[in-house]
Amino acid sequence: MVILGLIFKEIRHRKINFMLGSLAVTMAVALFISFFTAAKASNRETARLMLSMGFNLHIISKDTDMNEFLLTGLPDQTMPEQYLQKLAHQSEISYNHLLATLQKKINWRGLDVILTGLAPEVCPPGRKKPPMSYQIERGNLYVGYRVAKTLGLKETEVVQVEGKTLKVAKCLSESGGVDDIRIQCHLRDAQDILNLPGRISEIRAVDCLCFAPTDDPVSILRKEIGPLLPEAQVFHTKAIASARAKTRQMVRNLFAVIVPFVVIACGVWIGILAVMNVRDRQPEIGIMRALGYGSGRITLLFLGKAVIIGLLGATIGYVVGTALALNFGPDIFKITAKTMIKPESSLLACSLVLAPLFAALASFVPAMIAVTYDPAVTLREE
């Protein structure tokens, strides 16, 4: 109790030093809490934005003419729809977001278009994710920009496609790509239109970004998929996969660099304040040593103050950091902020343990300097 009383008296006497130390810990904790709280949203946001680049894994029939596929993007052979379920039931795999399609170029109302049937997107066990693609209900038709503009189609209009009655549910905005001349419907409707029941052209997917830098994703994916679908072949769009992986790694590296830098800077700040505190208290330390206070008790004075600074900084820093994440996060991470940015109560407990320890470690060397002073030399100078 005597030591604790002396610590609070010293805090009242040197308020500026105490407030500056608390500010350093508060800043370190607040930045860590805000970064950590927002990190989940950042990872999710990056993943969602990168997914907008499209599917990078294509599984097509082994008999497909690859030259034609690379030129047009349309497989000229089909394969059984059951292939999709075979892949979807595998848990130890390196892909997700499985989408079965049936595509063919047709002439509709005097215009060459690409008819695309989309099955509901499925995910392997334990990897449920929001869908990347349109989830089109049966009987509905999504019309590309050029098709809608050329044919003068409007939403809710009922049309005939090769004898199949469909409702124009959506006229898509301009993409500047092949989707502008595409009409999309449910897979079952496309199978009826093309008279290909139970058949699909392609299974699209996204690799899971779990590969090491030295791995060859294509070889791994072919080794996983080959035994399951011996009559299929795997085509991997490396440019999209590489861009997605590098972007996500860049975001991780950014957090990995910023947080340690801030923590180290604040640690140096606390250490400098502790050195200044030791220098200002030399006469006081000399008197205490002359009165019989041992090295351990004097060390406790400095480390005890550091612990109090850590506790106060941790509490304020948690509140400030959480408020920063909640206030500014939604403006930065517009897609995932509502579901991913939430107060992390477990971080408060961690802060209350780690921040005092951090402050004590930063003050340890100055405290050791304090206990080595010779009281006779100090008092003679005074």
Image (spheres, grey):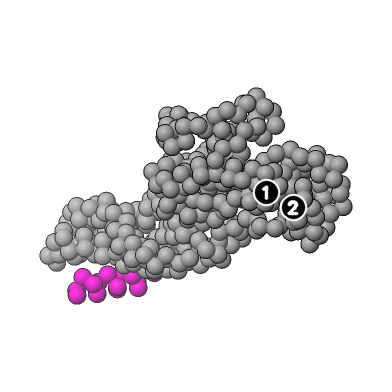
Q: Which residue is mark 2?
A: 164
SS at circle 1:
helix
The disc placed on residue 192 is 1
Residue 4 among those drawn in magenta:
yes
What span is colored magenta in the figure? 1-16
Tell me where residue 51 appears, x and y as whole percent.
58, 46
Which badge, 2 or 1, is on the more N-terminal residue?
2
Q: Mark 1: which amino acid?
A: Asp
Q: Is residue 348 left or right of residue 294?
A: right
Task: State the residue in front, 122 or 14.
Answer: 122
Q: Are marks 2 and 1 in contact (CB under 8 Å)?
A: yes
SS at circle 2:
strand
- Please tell me whether the stretch drawn in magenta is mainly helix, strand or loop: helix
How far is the residue under mark 2 from the one under mark 1? 8 Å
Q: Residue at x 46, y 32 (%)?
A: 230
Give the residue furthest to the top. Answer: 67
Where, by quadrant of the figure, is residue 375 drawn?
bottom left
Residue 281 among those drawn in magenta:
no
Q: Mark 2: which amino acid?
A: Lys
Task: State the residue in front, 98 or 45.
Answer: 98
The disc placed on residue 204 is none
Q: Is residue 319 above or below residue 370?
A: below
Q: Is residue 5 visible?
A: yes
Q: Residues within 10 Å of mark 2 (few under 14, many from 20)?
A: few
Tell me the quarter of the image containing the C terminus: bottom left
Tell me the quarter of the image containing the N terminus: bottom left
Q: Is residue 335 left or right of residue 152?
A: left
Tell me where residue 19 appears, x and y as whole percent.
41, 66
